[in-house]
Image (tube, rainbow, N blue to C red):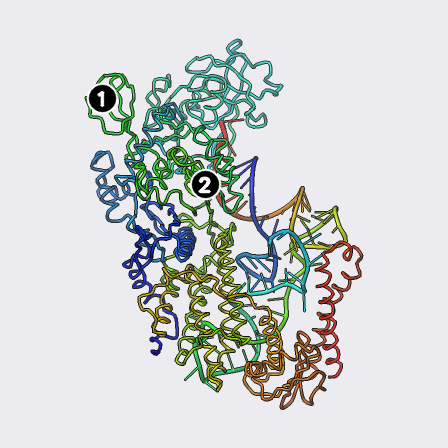
Amino acid sequence: MSPPMELSTRYTPKEIEGPLYEAWESAGCFQPPADGQGPAGRTGSGKTYTVMIPPPNVTGVLHMGHALNGTIQDIVVRHRRMQGYETLWVPGTDHAGIATQAVVEKKIYAEEQKTREDLGREEFLRRIWDWKEHHGNMILRQFRSLGCSCDWTRTKFTMDEDLSRAVRVSFVELWERGLIYRGARLVNWDCVLETAVSDDEIEYVQQKGKLWHLRYPLTDDPTQHLVVATTRPETMLGDTGVAVHPSDARYAQLVGKTVRLPFVNRDIPIVADDSVDPEYGSGAVKITPGHDPADYERGQRHSLPIISLLEKDGTFNEHGGPFAGKKREVVRKELVAALDEMGLLGEVESIVHNVSTSDRSKSPIEPIVSEQWFVKMQPLAEPAIGALKKGDLEFRPERWGKVYLHWLENVQDWCISRQLWWGHRIPVWYDEDDVPVASLDDLEIGATHPKTGKPIVRQDPDVLDTWASSWLWPLATLGWPDKAAADLGRFYPTQFLSTAQEIIYLWVARMVMAGYAFMPELPEAERNPFTTCYIHATVLDGKGKRMSKSAGNGIDPLDMIEKFGADAVRFSLVLLTKEGQDVRLAPDRFEQGSRFCNKVWNAARFVMMNLAGEASTEPSTRFEDRWILSSLARTRDSVTAALEEYRFNDAASEMYRFVWNDFCDWYVELSKHRLTGDDDASAMDARATLTRVLTDTLGLLHPFTPYLTEKLWAALHETLGRDPESMLCVAPWPTGDALSVDEGAEAEMAVLQDFVGCVRRVRALTMVPERKPVPVVVNATRADVRETMERHRGAAASLAFVESLEIAEAAERPAQSAVAVAGGLETFVVLGGDVDFAKLKTVLEGRAEKVGKALMGTEKKLQNEGFLKKADPELIEAEKERAKELALEKELLERNAAGL
RNA sequence: GGACCUAUAGCUCAGCUGGUUAGAGCGCUACGUUGACAUCGUAGAGGUCACUGGUUCGAAUCCAGUUAGGUCCACCA
């Protein structure tokens, strides 16, 4: 047996993490075994376990939410890998259309004062690719430093050639199934940047504004007016109706009549609509379907025409009448003044309201109508709803299923076109009559339109929504649309998806739809892309606010990794994050994980420093060995169960408790006198048990703290002269093999712990130092307890630092002794010097009172007829037993207090 | 406005399908360094389980309401 390798007294993550990660990767540990001939000596098991990373934006940097999610996925993946599954975790990034385009555009403007129009489409795209090559994927490197065991050889990007192909195939398939159509739609228009922006890029800014009351003359009788209230008076030029609430008596007789719109002299109808709030403003709403989403809806309901007033830069077009050609701000001012002059301006209220503002240009958003591409969602949603209802898909926590269903059951058609340059170009070409056609392969300008036979004149300039590629993620990363792709057959469907709540419908629901839509050849349940969708906690700051870049309250996980190590960050995150519960984080929360890692490190050091002698090969019959192995068995079972049920914090706290409280505080302490004592057989048993417990502990802990445990695994193997090539990362998960719960040993251990607790309490109370040997007399009325004490007097004496130990049934309290009571034991500690008996008396009385209260509680229960009649008989028995014990304890406490 | 979540020790949180002397970590108090670990050990103080009702023999736990905080979605003409 060789001496243990040199281990410092403190765990120093920084030095070991990098090399270990490289070792895992170069040994191919993260790749599933190919064709039964696995890397790192593994063979295929035939069972696969697949996880897809939610692809972060290429522009992204790791934040706490990523760190938490990365940790969760890695725990699952490492656990399954050790269980023998052929495990695949696919990493990658998302091209994130607008976010990326904005980042690069901004950078180019800052450096060269050039806009994307200045560069032109082709050059601009080249620049983005260039940027992506140099600065993208930073986030993937950060996932590595967390220890994530992704198969990096399969890294994907949503604009890779194969994924782009998949996007195009999916588009054409939907086109051919008649699920894609073109239609008018209000989009959020940024008049400064002259682009549509998505809902996500709008900020609602609270501003002071005015609510203008405008008086519209009735067509019948121009001396009468209908007053409408608006915050955007200039849009009146596009009004095609006025709405009032159907039950509003003030206007009831006007419904069906028309008003004449000033400036443009258009007669527009007055309609009744439930959406109008009679209390707000004048109770009458102007309807501008071309420039307001709510009005668009109202317009649809009442079949009102749509008028578009604005050019792309925000100037008014020919529908603006006298204001045509003027900017929107100017029109507002002039129009209000003109109305005032005509006597058509009523009250002007000052109000505070939310103005939708473009994130990027900070200018007010103008909703405008434009032509967009849509996907019909209804037919795609049906099977996705079925997946959840039939149980082929489950959410964790379950309640998120409701969010998923609610969205699917009210699903709107999906607008998939975006007026951007960065993204998958829409594969649609038009002939000279503007007849569109979708095509798998690019059509040349001048080529023949396959349907009309006329020449193609242009390709659609827009690109697809980012989610039009990410909804294919589980399919396309495995080789779809090539149905014969080996990975697709082997790893699809996947088992586990962990992601954030806010993308349940943006992403999760759509992936499910895609699975059903594009894998029709599979049995129904297997089309669903993942069986479990785990929604992880939202990470909040120490004050309970969401962590975000803009709020500046984020904790950088990389700083924490730098300071505490990846394992400490991982362990802390998981320990703190109860399933389904948001988590508040402050930097000092990571210390707990850090301390734990150090504890494990030192426990392992202790074990290895004491393995220099022979170890037993037969199972030990000694109670402390049986006790710790029993506890190990319980822990192993509950950790395994917790991991399989995604209760990661339960698993982590079980490990924490076992390692710290059972193994370090009791077993290691109990082993010390054996390892240095004269009883060789006992020492051999201790060495065997220490080795066994450490080995399994490292295995159980590996998913949580991979670096620490891998390092210690290597050290242990070196110490024992075992296979130096062995890697914990791909070692088998600790399982049953003869390790089971031993209730006898547990009961004996409980007696010992009671005894030691008594002695320690007396010492603390009377200021006798922990290690100063003292004579102890212990009374145990129960014979079995007395026998246990007799059997383990050596262990008891060693743990309690006893000078002499007398075990009796009813000994008198020795002179100059203090006493503590627990579990039916009456423990007298003989002290030298002065003892504060008055203080001791107070403590005993206090305890007696507490125990008395508990006793009263149980007695009350036992006298309660309802309880005796209705409660579980076993429970009643237990309660009687408890009453006996409490009564004994109370008696002992009172007797001793009285004797002082 | 809609949906959902939370309220337990000074702080951050556990407490599963109702029966515990209501727990953990941090912080606090006292004591302790001859070697696994001071990123440690031992002992201790500290809680009307937000409030009000209800169900029950029995409620931190189940139900209803109130209050306070949070998250997501929608968005005010």
Label of residue A457 in the image: 1
> Residue flagged by tag 2: what amino acid is it?
Ile
Q: Which residue is mark 2?
A: A504
Which mark is first along the chain, 1 or 2?
Answer: 1
Residue in the picture at 69% in, 75% down? A824
Q: Residues within 10 Å of mark 1 (few under 14, many from 20)?
A: some
> Residue flagged by tag 1: what amino acid is it?
Val
Residue A154 position in % (x across, y down): 30, 48
Q: Residues within 10 Å of mark 2 (few under 14, many from 20)?
A: some
- Of residues A455 and A639, the one nearer the viewer is A639
Asked whether residue A555 is in view, the answer is no
- Residues indicated by labels 2 and 1 sit on the same polypeptide chain: yes
Q: Is residue A838 above or below residue A713?
A: below
Quadrant in which the N terminus of chain A appears: bottom left
Asked whether residue A547 is in view, the answer is yes
Chain letter, disc 2 residue: A
